[in-house]
Image (tube, rainbow, N blue to C red):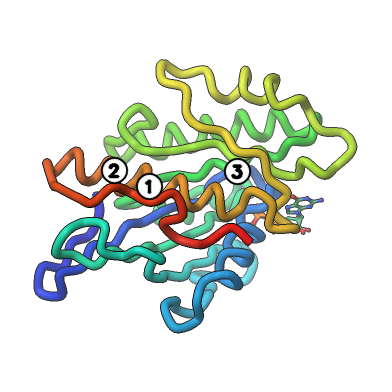
Amino acid sequence: MAFINFARREIAFKIVYYGPALCGKTTNLEQIHMAVDPRTRGELTMLSTQQDRTLFFDFLPLKSDVIKGFISKFQLYTVPGQNIYNETRKLVLRNVDGVVFVADSQFDKMEENLDSLANLESNLRLQNDSLARLPYLLQFNKRDLPMVAPVHYIDFLLNNRETRVPTIEAVSTEGVGVFETLNLMSKMVMAHFMKQNNLAGSSLPDEVCVSER
Ligand SMILES: Nc1nc2c(ncn2[C@@H]2O[C@H](COP(=O)(O)OP(=O)(O)OP(=O)(O)O)[C@@H](O)[C@H]2O)c(=O)[nH]1
Ligand SMILES: [Mg+2]
């Protein structure tokens, strides 16, 4: 649930980049951090130990007055993908408003993608949340590599719940699909918040956070 600061008329939305080890979560955040106006963003911060590679930063979107009377702010987090860091992932998931699930498109990573998605579901369940309630989307990353699975196959494996979610192909090292992912996720999170709270808002722009280069 978004954090609302009534005194400052500010809403903070928390978006978590989730996925298996080395799928490209940190790369997404680094690309976004580079692209966002330095005057409106915080530092890219390592949250815990060097080994578990949890990153965080916050920023104001391009259009931060979408929800009338409030400034909206986004907080982006990555979790460490390796199995041993599940306690960190549980902590980072607390009060999450939206999840970008970054899948590694390489054929030999499908099992890890599936395991990570199952891990996300079970960690959400522990906090009485679920993918059915939470805005999320799938990013199919590393599309530049030679041994990638076809998009429809990854979709078949990962996107088979009651409601299909949006998918975006990406090469995050080159910034391809990275901003599209963030803009769409941000829109989904804001729309969800407005719906839940019966709030009026101006129509949501496509490029709510960063402009495509
Ligand atoms: N070829 C290619 N390499 C990528 C892409 N995205 C990320 N990488 C590389 O994959 C490696 C892992 O990327 P990270 O962003 O650190 O992955 P992560 O998901 O944060 O990994 P953990 O923190 O261990 O969970 C790095 O060497 C990246 O440069 C991509 O789209 N294409
Ligand atoms: Mg990382």
Q: Residue at x 52, y 17 (%)?
A: 160
The answer to whether the beta carbon of the residue marked 3 is less than 8 Å from any atom of ligand 1 is: yes
Q: Residue at x 61, y 49 (%)?
A: 81
Classed neighbour count for the residue bearing mark 1: other residues with Cα under 10 Å, few (<14), some (14–19), many (≥20) = many
* Image location (x, y in percent) of residue 68: 16, 59
Indicate the amino acid at tag 2: Ala
Between 14 and 119, the residue placed more toward the observer is: 14
Residue farthest to the right?
146
* Image location (x, y in percent) of residue 44: 53, 75
Above or below residue 164? Residue 196 is below
Q: CA distance from mark 1 to mark 3?
A: 18 Å
Between 126 and 104, the residue placed more toward the observer is: 104
Ligand 1 found in image quarter: bottom right
User: Which quadrant of the figure contains the C terminus?
Assistant: bottom right
Dot 1 or dot 3, earlier in sequence? 3
Q: Nearer the viewer, mark 3 or mark 2?
A: 2
Does residue 171 appear to the left or right of 79 in the view shown?
right
Classed neighbour count for the residue bearing mark 3: other residues with Cα under 10 Å, few (<14), some (14–19), many (≥20) = many
Residue of label 3: 102
Q: Are marks 1 and 2 in contact (CB under 8 Å)?
A: yes
Number of marks in picture: 3
Mark carried by residue 187: 1
- Give the secondary structure at mark 2: helix
The answer to whether the beta carbon of the residue marked 2 is less than 8 Å from any atom of ligand 1 is: no
Q: Residue at x 68, y 57 (%)?
A: 175
Does residue 196 appear to the left or right of 13 in the view shown?
left
Between 149 and 204, the residue placed more toward the observer is: 204
Q: Residue at x 44, y 46 (%)?
A: 185
* Image location (x, y in percent) of residue 60: 37, 70
Residue of label 2: 191
- In the rendered image, which quarter is residue 11 located in? bottom left
Does residue 49 appear to the left or right of 205 in the view shown?
right
